[in-house]
Each structure stands twice: as structure tokens, then as C-alpha cells.
């Protein structure tokens, strides 16, 4: 393999990831594994690009060098950012599936047992059907999740990168809080958050920061829309700094003016729910149990709130449209998979105060050998302006 000096991680880290994938391939008797998922390609090779919406494939054989089939425009990125030597780019006037078929044939893989990701946003049903028709002698095996299973457990290199990303997240959150006041607009707050986060070292995040005030705070995933902040508004802020595609999300809630008794009660309940979750988190405990710890606290609150979504989700590598890995593992009812050391989650218990808005105080958290560690760490309290 080619050794590069400008890779995100030492070459040994990529070799470990490749060897682990090949171990899983052997369990399913695969000759080749094809991935089209941008985060998986980044995980295996280091490649990243906002142009991931175009077809992109990496073919990993049981032996020998992996081969990438990217758009020609992205070839320069592979040369600059990855350790791959074998590149077979397609032109914009070529069909990428034709190029993939030709590449399989070039390396003698057109009649092999090939793993692919059926559950992939970036390998469409039409493209899958076309490839199957063009390779009638091959046996295609749905191996969705085979790479994600390894991504759940972060290496020490990944954890350290997420810690650095967390410092940029915190800088952005502090700037956002400082910019909130009656008369400012959501755009003012978003501008301050983005500027401070990037100034602190963040690269481009997979989702823009969320800024929602007043009644807009009760809208799922609402972000800045020019609204002027008023006295009596709840303010919801959420963002994630990013380094080399690794994110560390953080959410905070504030109030302009004097918070109501109900808002203060909700603040107390959410903080207690968060504490219950982190006290429950440790290797061997199921994601369901941690989620249940939050729901028990929130469900027993006198204001009658409830956890309206998953209470935590895996986080690490992200490309648009998501900074999370919740599709790999989320803490929610009936999710019985056990936690393991070096899993990382965005822990976000929250409660909806009817007629006023949502309240949450979240952190990015790492599961340790006997508990958990806060990767982000920011005062967990309602900020009042």
C-alpha cells in the first residue's frame, strides 16, 4: 500500500480498518465488497467531498489493492486525501454503472461473490438493477451495515479528533448565547455561531447550526429564518463542530426575560434525565436501558412531558445530510444492543413545554471501560438573557 504523509490517521489505522472489514467479508464468503456510502468510503480511505451526491464506489477485494470508481472531478481528491493507488474514474458523459462493471471485469471480479449496500442513499435502485443486469454471472449479496458495525467503536485516534472538534463546538455555542437578546434576529445568532465555530478551527459541518426562537422552537429541526427575538422567547441552539468529518454536537436552551415556573421545572427535569442517562451508561448495558432511564424521569415530571424522539444517537463521521450515525445505533425503546467502550453518542434528553417550546441540554459522550466521559462539556443550564 502507498504510504502518504498527509493522511488524517497513520496508515496503520487504515490497515486495521481494512483488515477488520475483510474479517467480516470472510464470514460471509465474499470475494469483493463494494461500498457507495460516503461515510464508509471516508472511514476506509480518508476521502471526503461535498460532491458525494454523485455516484462513488470503492471495491475492496479479499486480497490485493482496493479500487475506487469516482467521478473524474473527484479523482484529484482521491490522490490528495487517500492512500488508494488504483483509481478508475468515469467521465460525466459516461454512466458510472458501466464504468463499475468494466472495472469489475478488468480485475476479474465480474463473476465473483460481491457484497453491496442495498440500503444506501447513494446507490439507487435503478443503479443496482442496472449493475445486476450487466454482471449476470456475479452473485450479489446485500451486506448493508458491514462497515458501519466497525464504525460504532471509535479508535483512540478518532476519539482525540472528536475532542478537538468539541472545542470548536463549544466556541460556537458560547458565541451564540452571547449574541441572543431581544431585538436580535435568528440570523444574527446563526452568523455569530458559524463565525466563532469556524474561527476556532471547525471545518464544514454536515448540518448547519439550528437556531429557533419563540414558537419556532417547537418545530422539529427548525433553524434561522430571520425572526426577531422577543421578550418571553425560548431559544433553542444546536450545532456540531467538525474536523475531518468527525462531529461533536451540542444543544442548549435559553430564555429572554424571566422564565416561567413551567420552564424552570422543565429545565430541572431535563437535567435530571441527562444525569440518569450518563449514570446508566457503561459497557454491557443496552441502549434500551439508557433510553428508559431518561423516559422514566421525564414521564414522571409534573408538567406532563415526554421524550418525543430517540434520547441519544451514535455520532462520528458525517457527511450531508446528517452529522449523526443514528441509523447505525440510537438509544430508543426496544434497541437491545449492548453498549461497548469507545462508542460515542449525542445524548439529548428533551422536553416540550406546551405553548412555549422545547428544552434540552445535550452533550457528546464517550462510553468508557466503566462508565462514560463527556467529550463536549458546557454548562448545562438554561441561559437567561
Image: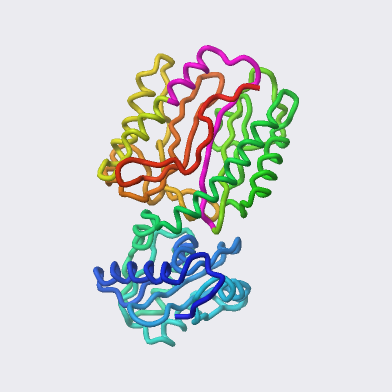
Q: Quadrant of the N terminus?
A: bottom left
Residue 377 relative to residue 273: left or right: right
Q: Nearer the viewer, residue 380 or 182?
A: 380
Residue 147 relative to residue 172: left or right: left
Q: Nearer the viewer, residue 177 or 41?
A: 177
> Residue at left 57%, top 76%?
79
Q: Position of residue 166 (x, y in %)?
A: 54, 46
> Residue at left 54%, top 76%?
95
Q: Position of residue 196 (x, y in %)?
A: 67, 43
> Magenta stretch containing residue 264, yes or no?
yes
> Magenta stretch containing residue 193, yes or no?
no
Q: Residue furthest top?
A: 261
Q: How is the image coloured?
A: rainbow
Q: Quadrant of residue 32?
A: bottom left
Q: Residue furthest right?
A: 183
Q: Nearer the viewer, residue 371 or 233?
A: 371
> Residue at left 44%, top 67%?
44
Q: Quadrant of residue 269?
A: top left
Location of residue 333 with respect to 55 vertically, above or below: above
Q: Quadrant of the C terminus?
A: top right
Q: Position of residue 348 (x, y in %)?
A: 45, 35
- Which segment is the magenta one? 245-271
Amino acid at each position: 500500500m502507498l504510504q502518504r504523509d498527509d493522511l488524517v490517521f497513520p496508515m496503520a489505522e487504515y490497515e486495521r480498518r481494512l483488515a477488520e472489514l475483510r474479517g467480516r467479508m470472510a464470514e460471509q464468503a465474499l470475494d469483493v465488497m463494494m461500498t457507495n456510502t460516503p461515510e464508509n468510503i471516508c472511514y476506509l480511505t480518508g476521502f471526503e467531498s461535498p460532491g458525494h451526491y454523485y455516484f462513488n464506489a470503492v471495491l475492496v477485494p479479499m486480497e490485493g489493492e482496493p479500487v475506487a470508481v469516482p467521478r473524474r472531478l473527484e479523482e484529484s481528491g482521491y490522490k490528495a486525501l487517500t492512500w488508494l493507488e488504483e483509481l478508475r474514474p468515469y467521465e460525466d458523459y459516461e454512466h458510472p454503472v458501466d464504468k463499475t462493471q468494466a472495472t469489475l471485469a478488468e480485475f476479474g471480479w465480474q463473476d465473483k461473490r460481491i457484497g453491496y449496500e442495498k440500503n444506501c442513499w447513494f446507490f439507487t435502485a435503478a443503479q443496482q438493477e442496472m449493475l445486476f443486469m450487466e454482471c449476470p454471472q456475479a452473485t450479489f449479496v446485500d451486506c448493508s451495515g458491514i462497515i458501519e458495525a466497525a464504525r460504532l467503536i471509535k479508535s483512540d485516534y478518532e476519539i482525540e479528533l472528536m475532542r478537538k472538534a468539541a472545542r470548536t463546538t463549544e466556541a460556537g455555542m458560547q458565541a451564540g448565547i452571547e449574541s441572543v437578546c431581544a431585538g436580535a434576529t435568528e440570523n444574527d445568532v446563526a452568523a455569530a455561531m458559524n463565525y466563532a465555530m469556524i474561527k476556532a478551527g471547525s471545518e464544514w459541518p454536515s448540518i448547519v447550526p439550528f437556531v429557533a426562537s419563540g414558537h419556532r422552537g417547537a418545530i422539529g429541526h427548525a433553524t434561522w429564518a430571520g425572526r426577531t427575538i422577543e421578550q418571553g422567547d425560548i431559544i433553542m441552539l444546536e450545532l456540531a463542530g467538525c474536523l475531518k468529518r468527525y462531529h461533536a454536537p451540542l444543544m442548549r436552551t435559553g430564555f429572554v426575560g424571566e422564565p416561567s415556573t413551567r420552564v424552570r421545572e422543565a429545565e430541572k427535569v431535563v437535567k435530571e434525565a441527562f444525569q440518569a442517562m450518563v449514570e446508566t451508561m457503561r459497557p454491557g448495558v443496552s441502549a434500551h436501558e439508557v433510553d428508559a432511564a431518561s423516559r422514566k424521569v421525564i414521564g414522571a415530571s409534573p408538567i406532563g412531558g415526554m421524550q418525543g424522539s430517540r434520547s441519544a444517537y451514535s455520532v462520528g463521521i458525517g457527511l450531508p445530510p446528517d452529522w449523526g450515525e443514528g441509523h447505525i445505533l440510537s438509544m430508543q425503546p426496544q434497541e437491545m444492543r449492548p453498549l461497548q467502550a469507545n462508542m460515542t453518542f449525542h445524548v439529548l434528553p428533551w422536553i416540550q413545554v406546551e405553548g412555549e417550546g422545547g428544552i434540552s441540554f445535550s452533550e457528546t459522550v464517550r462510553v468508557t471501560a466503566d462508565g462514560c466521559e463527556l467529550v463536549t462539556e458546557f454548562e448545562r443550564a438554561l441561559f437567561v438573557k
